[in-house]
Image (tube, rainbow, N blue to C red):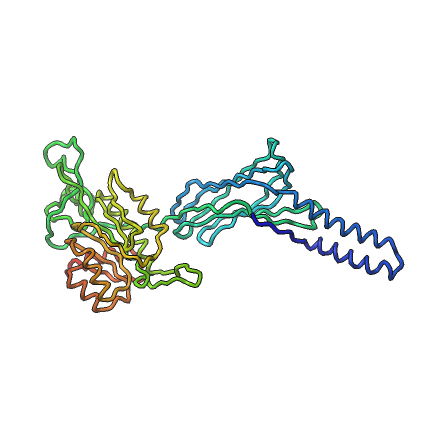
Amino acid sequence: MNRSVVLTSRGIGFLVAAVVCFVAAPILSLPALLYVTVLLVGLVVFSTIFVFGGHSNVRIERSFSPQVVGPGLTAKATVRVTNLSMIPCLEAQWADVLPSGISGDASGTLPALGGSRQSDSRVSFSYALQGLRRGRHPIGPLKVQVLDPFGLVYRKHSFGAEEPLIVLPRRIDLLALAPRGESDDGATRPAPQHVGVGDDDVIARAYLPGDAMKRLHWKATAHRGQLMVRQEEQQINPRAGVFLDCEPRSQGTARDGKGVWEHSPTFEWGIVAAASIVHHLARNGYVVSFQTSSPAIDREISDGQDSVEDAMVDLAVLEPDETEHNRYMAPERAAFAILGRLDIPRAEHWIHAVGGARDVHAFVASGTSAAALDVLDGARWKVVTYRPNDDLAAMWMLFDAARARA
């Protein structure tokens, strides 16, 4: 708890008047001015003692509902203030400290509190917070400003510890990609166990990269207006891998003088892309293996294991990391890589890490050398180059053209 006592402009005026009266008393031969001096100084001293007695020992409890919030959405912060001292607390002004990634009207009037043994020794209040940027944002401490009844002195307090509010990354809705030519047969999600025999017992889902042409469900495609794929009994869940590059040099970032990573638009674009692709695949029934180039994220998203929400929280707090993952997932049939700016060694690194996948789609940051792109092309990767201000949904659909070129 930090505290400080500050004179108001009125308090400063009282002290200035006291000094003037003290100097003028002998000059004007008016001893009564000395009494005025004592009165003015005494009021300032009394006010200082008065504000020291208020809020000398309080407990702050802060909670959020929900504790994890989506970007642009609001959460409710509830603060409970309990007076632990037997001395009552004065009415005061409060304000919660908010970081730059959070907005909200976190200020107000704190009513007077009774002593610790009184029923009115506790009060709670709430206010709305809006998440502006992904991350773990510390809220607090609570700043309390106590003013004396004469308005001469106020005291600043800082109570309670910081409490984190997690804001999730943005997610963009992605459309199914159209197939280009014949591909190897792939597994799809199992149908419900009560299906019967015949075409009516087949359930269709949206087409995803890696699905075989012979799995296309033309009746459902005509009905839905988009490519649909059969899901038949006894089939296993389709699998896909998602990789995110968080190596600092690839993402064009470094630590500043305070040890904090500088903002990287390329990295933030990759976060949104990874969140959107993972959500898109999982929503369409895929078992998703999701890893970063560092050990920070290593998820298997499927029923009974990790959830999409787990991966979103991971991405919310993800930072660049120089540490390399020493155990990449087993090769999946289809893989999606969101990479930074690559040179030849970095491109070869990713081919080695993801090379076992049969169908690899990669977002690669603008600025990647032509030689590195040639390395990826030689591995038959479908590559789309992006800039941080590019629209993800539009860039996603460019994989159709990349598949055609491949």
Q: In the picture provided, is 251 more to the left or to the right than 49?
A: left
Is residue 401 at all visible to an observer of this figure?
no
Left of 150 or right of it: where is 97? left
Judged from this view, the residue extending furthest toward the bottom is 370
The location of residue 119, given as percent across then percent down, is 60, 31
Residue 323 in the image: x percent, y percent?
30, 57
Q: Decide which of 217, 351 is in the foreground and name it.
A: 351
Q: Residue at x 19, y 46 (%)?
A: 239
- Looking at this view, is 82 or 195 the one in front? 82
* Quadrant holding the C terminus: bottom left
Count how many numbered circles sit on residues in the image.
0
Q: Based on the displayed image, in which of its 4 quarters is residue 122 positioned?
A: top right
Place of residue 365 in the rendered image (x, y in percent of width and height, measured from the top left): 28, 62
83 horizontally vs 378: left or right: right
As drawn, which residue projects farthest toward the right? Answer: 29
Nearest the viewer among 52 and 252 is 52
